Amino acid sequence: MFEDSYSSTHPPLPPTTEDDRVSWLRLLRSRRVGVATFWRLMGEHGTAQDALAALPEVARAAGVAKYEICPEGVVLAEMKAARIKGARMICLGDPHYPPDLAQLSDAPPILWVIGDPQVLSRPMVALVGARNASSLGLRMARTLAEGLSEAGYAVASGLARGIDTAAHLAALKGGTVATMAGGVDVLYPSENTRLGEQITEEGGARISEQPMGLQPIARHFPTRNRIVSGLSRAVVVVEAAAKSGSLITARNALDQGRDVMAVPGHPLDARAGGCNILIRDGARLVRGVEDVIEGLPPLDMPLQPELNLRTPEKPATAPVVAFPAPPPERRSLQDVSKLHNQILARLGPSPLAEDQLIRDLGAPSGAVSPVLTDLEIEGRIQRQPGGLLSLIVSR
């Protein structure tokens, strides 16, 4: 284990210099460091520089030999590519970081943004749905997006075909945010290249947590979906099959404490199956934009109470930064080994909620969290959106 690598117990601060930003990006891009591990290391070491210095020893203690952190040249090249494409790095704690997204325990430490970052501070509603949407579904998406824009909300979606495209187009003038599964500079699908450009030209923004230039692959879309829902006060599903990415977004929204709403459809239309299931299970039924607005808190009410971050330069309106707690007391190697085995015995290929695992173990979360970090770096477990954990089964 890596108790001896704990170097700080003070709360970590957001980056304020270029060197700090480079260190944040190096830590996040280092091998086997996901979002949860990033925040855990920051909580243990206080700064990204100290976390980077400790990471090889953390990996060695987890059984990973010859571990190397992400080279500085790699992130400098990514930052150069961002400048060329006109992308801006926004770190959690920056005044432009989306305030509702900042509330999440798995909030992206870094977002690349192309467009007007001011739109990210506005209250948002996500509109999502089927790629092979019907004419009625597309019309409903346009109507809802226009109505939400007129009411003062920005519209969030994923720049996919179908419902996403209709929602972005209808909200261009009022402000819309497209969350990308790949790099923020990679417009996917290619048929939406012009739409992606229009979004930034009209005062909206494209955002991504992925490296610049990265082509999207299947596993990026569920993590993208958690950002779509995390940005938003509510997620409205316009059309969706019973098994679809839109329902993943809806489940993320529920896990994040967001409202889920759905447009009903005919029982014999497969594209309405997911929406009808959501309504059956308690989602708010949407007949028009009035139903959406009725279910939302007032525009001037924050989603959750704001806290003050320990930085004198930071405006009072800056988003919340919920950093992890300081590291727990040191534990014996025997205790750590026992906890390793207990965790691995309780996890399987099917995802399990982290809080449920902690309850099952009957151990304090402060003792379990660093062991989970250890196992993630070791490549034994995988974190998934919504606070879920699963065992990595070697083939």
Image (spheres, rainbow, N blue to C red):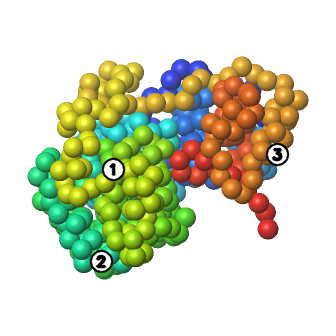
Q: Quadrant of residue 77?
A: bottom left
Q: Position of residue 30 (x, y in %)?
A: 59, 50
Which amino acid lies under the numbered mark 3 shown in the image of this protein? Ala
Is the Cβ of the residue at disc 3 closer than 8 Å to that at disc 1? no
Element under disc 2? loop
Q: Position of residue 271 (x, y in %)?
A: 39, 73
CB-based contact (under 8 Å), mark 2 and mark 3:
no
The answer to whether 386 appears left or right of 353 in the picture is: left
Where does the N terminus fall, quadrant-wise?
A: top right
Q: Quadrant of the C terminus?
A: bottom right
The answer to which quarter of the image holds residue 175 is: bottom left
Label 2: how many Cα within 10 Å (few below 14, some 14–19, many 20+) = some
| Of residues 153 and 250, the one drawn nearer to the viewer in this rendering | 250
Residue pointed to by mark 1? 284
Q: Is residue 291 above or below residue 161?
A: above
> Helix or strand or loop: what does disc 1 sit on?
strand
Distance of mark 3 from mark 1, alpha carbons?
39 Å
The tag earlier along the polypeptide, 3 or 1, is 1
Q: Which mark is residue 214?
A: none
Q: CA distance from mark 1 to mark 2?
A: 21 Å
Q: Residue at x 27, y 56 (%)?
A: 286
Q: Is residue 170 visible?
A: yes
The picture places residue 136, in percent across and down from the top left corner, at: 24, 74
Mark seen at residue 345: 3
Q: Which residue is mark 2?
A: 134
- Where 203 falls versus 129 (above or below)? above
Total marks placed? 3
Pointer 2 or 3: first along the chain: 2
Q: Position of residue 339 (x, y in %)?
A: 80, 35
